Amino acid sequence: MSSELRDFLALSYGELEDLNLEAKEQRKNRVAAHKIQEQRLKYLTDEKRIKAVTVLFSDLEGRLHMLDYDKKFLVKSWDNLTFDGSSIRGFTAQRESDLRLGIDWSAFYWAPSDVFGSGKVLVFGEVIDKNGKPYSADIRGELKQFASKLYKSDGYTLNAANEIEGFLFKGVDAERSYYQTGKFEYVNTGGYYHSLPGDPLRTFIDTTAEVQRAMGFENEKDHPEVAPSQFEINYTYGEVVAAADQIQLYKLICRQVATNLGMTASFLPKPVVGVNGSGMHTNVSISKDGKNLFWDAKGEEKVSDFAWNFVDRILTHGNDLCLLLNASVNAYRRLDPHFEAPNQIKASAVDRGSMIRIPIGNEKSARIEVRSVSPDANPYMVLYSIFRSGLQGNKSTVKNLRQAERYLPDNVYTAIEDFRSSAWTTKLLGADVKGRYADLKQAAADRCARLLGTFVKVPEVQYHHDVYNQFLWNMF
């Protein structure tokens, strides 16, 4: 069929950026949900060039799922969208499979048609249980409830910014074919900050940055990372749920752009032994009435007692949380001290081997940086566990906790054991969701060698939740 017959929405990157920044500002200013809902429904009704709405949600492990609803159907039935939860790993059993999708109208995005297809817009969904309440295994919903309650009770706004590293490899589906090839091929070997204009890595970074800019990310800087063919594209702070949504969009954009270029964007934490792995350094702060509560010009490292108490609680629960922040078998290759690994359960302003770093900051930028997070972790789980642990977790009675010689687990089996035995993770997630999550991690671990060894094993990639190949799982 000739494309001339199709009159589908396809906006310029400048128009997209204006629309997305306007929506972002509404979200930041906490415009009432019913007002945004009314505005979005009117827009969808009036804009005849939109054919479908892509609704996004994440499973318990953080894998992103997408459903396309016909625009006219969604406008009529947005409050009664059902789906089969038993088909989603970590969600319902077959005997109780029906779940609903609510629409978070504030999390609405216009996407470039040359990347996502014309005539579509994106919106994040909220998983609703049969009783009409938020579904407990939808961690995005848990994070949103937690952040909203804190804002209402204490006036706190939870802020986050994530530095997400990844690798660019030759060929489409390089991860899915790893069980056949046994290797990844670099597209560039230039190294830190170095990539010639127009080479494959620079073309990928430039294209991805353009898409992010159009989608309202408010980019800051982008560059090749330390390892060959590695990249990082940074963007500005956001309120915690919006920040987690942007992590999911970042990875989606990177994968789609790479595929369009005939390559693979990989967020395996350590896909190649012998070079630096990929992390997702997570910068967090808390503000109230526009004031950064982590800042204190006279405090130790110029952060407040409030911030240090936050740090101490996270360090207390360092081993408890490790499986949430490092969610895969492969992630434990990255916690290697020979490659600037943040595997020490301590806090420091200078030691990059520390789980938590205190970056140089000012009244606006004072924050703490949790460095021991892998890019394949569920972003909603990461931010939920960090903020709730930092605010409501236990404080250790150990003296000099911030300099103690303690280390994170060096393999997923130990991390699973620490997670299962922790009373705090039960309080954090509830016994049911905790058990489901641990069982999913155990299932992947049981398919892999207990000792990591000196090269990446096929099962680490083959049964990785971010790569997920249903066909291969069923061959085990």
Image (cartoon, rainbow, N blue to C red):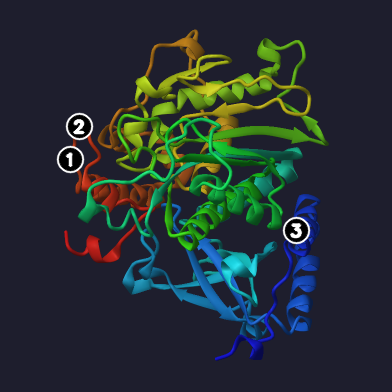
Tell me the element at label 2. loop
**Quarter that holds the C terminus:** bottom left
In the picture, measured across the screen, residue 402 lies left or right of residue 450, that is right
Name the residue located 36 percent from the left edge and 59 percent from the top edge: 173
Look at the image and tell me whether residue 388 can be seen: no
Q: Which mark is residue 449?
A: 1
Tell me the element at label 3. helix
**Image location of residue 114, percent across then percent down:** 61, 68
**Image location of residue 424, percent across then percent down:** 44, 35
Q: Which residue is mark 2?
A: 453
Q: What is the three-letter code of the residue carrying label 2?
A: Gly
Say if mark 3 contacts mark 1, CB within 8 Å: no
Q: Nearer the viewer, mark 3 or mark 1?
A: 3
The image quarter in which residue 473 lies: bottom left
The numbered mark, 2 or 3, whose residue comes first in the sequence reads: 3
Q: What is the three-letter code of the residue carrying label 3?
A: Glu
Name the residue located 52 percent from the left edge and 62 percent from the top edge: 57
Say if mark 1 contacts mark 2, CB within 8 Å: yes
Looking at the image, residue 261 lies above or below residue 418: below
Looking at the image, residue 47 lies above or below residue 476: below
Q: Nearer the viewer, mark 1 or mark 2?
A: 2
Q: Nearer the viewer, residue 387 or 106?
A: 106
Q: What is the three-letter code of the residue carrying label 1?
A: Ala
Name the residue located 19 percent from the left edge and 33 percent from the top edge: 451
The numbered mark, 3 or 1, whose residue comes first in the sequence reads: 3
Q: Nearer the viewer, residue 333 or 180?
A: 180
The image quarter in which residue 189 lies: top left
For disc 2, the neighbor class at 10 Å (few under 14, some 14 to 19, many from 20) is few
Q: Which residue is mark 3?
A: 17
